[in-house]
Amino acid sequence: MKKGFLAVLCSCASIISASADTVSLSLDSCVQLAMQNNKTVQSAQKLAEKYGHEVKTYKANFFPNFKLVASDIWANSEGSVGGDIFAGVSDGVSQFLSGLTQIGHFDATNAYEMQALKQFGEGMADLNKGIDYKIGNIIQAGILVEQPIYMGGKVMTAYQMSKLGQQMAEQGAQLSQNEVIVQVQEAYALAVRANEMHKVAVRYDSLLQSLLVDVQNAEKHGLRSHNDVLKVQVKLSEAELQMRQAENGQRLATMNLCHYIGLPLTTQVVVDADAFAVAPDVQADRLADVSARPEYSILAMKSELAAKQVKIERAEYLPQVVLAGTYSYVDGFEVAGSKLFNKPAAAVMLNVVVPLYHANAGINKIRSSRLEAERAQLEQDDLIEKMNLELAQAANNLDEAFLEVELANKSLAQTEDNLRSSRSAYNLGTESLSDLLEAQTLWQQSYAKLANAKANLFVAATKYRKAAGRL
């Protein structure tokens, strides 16, 4: 799009006329400028880019999730635990050792063995007193890894829904572009028609100016009455008013075109009259359908999204399996004057969750999402019928527009012949001035009708291409 915009600017720069505020633009250049400056198109493109990033976000759910976790806990708590518990254990062990001594397992004369018994006894005595502990400050830091194994199909379905959302946004951007194209082409057609109206007004005024000179000369020689001069002057006044109206219409049409393409309203845009040439292949096809339209694709994907939402709701009530692993270091918690935790450790956990029963909430959610999917399908069918009706109407309008141009061309050819015949007869004196003035008026009206017919055909062809998805 940037390259296209630069090309448009270069083409504009190369055809700037003597006035800095006057540019000559083709229809394609106007469309490209509108694409660059239209806020609706830009917003739709940004939305498509946004959904593109969301697709990547949901795709990341297929891969492990690494987290760095850390915590620092401080508690002012200390005391002793285990005195009563170890007292019974100490008495039992002492009785057991006494029995071993009596049966000869320990020799009272062996200094080494007796020293060991003494140390053991002292240790048991310390246990009888209990174990001192102190919580103090506990620091924990490590890496946590989580990997979903099975989530009821929710991960895959959510990813597919994100891709559908991206495609819908892209089709929405295309729809916005199509609407802008129709608006710009219609504005361009109005500008071309306004130019043609100005041309015919100028030519009609020129004819009357020439006729006025002839009638005034004839009056000087006594061949025409002063009443004839007045008749021409009245028509000339009407022609001047029509020419002023044509100039105002031309100015407004140019301002309207500048509004759509993003140029200052005071810019004088020179349009191409050949833009009215409709390609021969733009014919109403009664067998055409609307499947190529962005709206059709959006409706189909909307129904598909609603169907996938049913799977999302169902996945909430299916078993979920997650594998997690951690490698962390813990420091703190003193026991008997020594730290209990002071080295790293690894752990692996397999978490399985199986929903059982929640007052039929899952069944109701699934039924609700199914009804929404059915509603989306009904809405799709209804809007497709309306689009087919719109296509049929656009085809009828295109047929009528072609016929209107054909009849306008015939009418213009007939009025031109009539004007030439009337002019010759007037010069020979066999036809009145009123008949000549009427012939000139009929010619002007036929020329204006042809300009209107060509503009209508151009717009009808554009709207038909949009309705058929061929824009």
Image: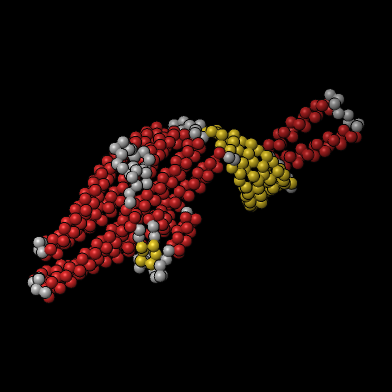
Residue 178 position within the rendered picture, expressed as x and y whole percent measured from the top left: 37, 49
Point 47% across, 58% down: residue: 7
Front position in the image: 248 or 454: 454
Q: In the figure, is residue 405 to the left or right of 343?
A: left
Q: In the figure, is residue 11 to the left or right of 274?
A: right
Point 33% across, 51% down: residue: 277
For residue 433, say whether it is visible: yes
In the rendered image, the vertical position of residue 198 relative to residue 296, given as above or below: below
In the rendered image, the vertical position of residue 100 relative to residue 235, given as above or below: above
Front position in the image: 300 or 346: 300
For residue 434, say whether it is visible: no
Front position in the image: 269 or 53: 269
Residue 316 position within the rendered picture, expressed as x and y whole percent measured from the top left: 46, 35
- Quarter of the view holding residue 427: bottom left
Point 91% across, 31% down: residue: 109
- Quarter of the view holding residue 31: bottom left
Q: Seen from this angle, which residue lies furthest bottom?
A: 220
Residue 170 position within the rendered picture, expressed as x and y whole percent measured from the top left: 43, 46
Total numbered labels: 0
- Quarter of the view holding residue 106: top right
Residue 40 position within the rendered picture, expressed as x and y whole percent measured from the top left: 39, 54
Point 36% across, 38% down: residue: 291
Q: In the figure, is residue 260 to the left or right of 432?
A: right
Front position in the image: 351 or 178: 178
Q: Identify the colour scheme used.
A: secondary structure
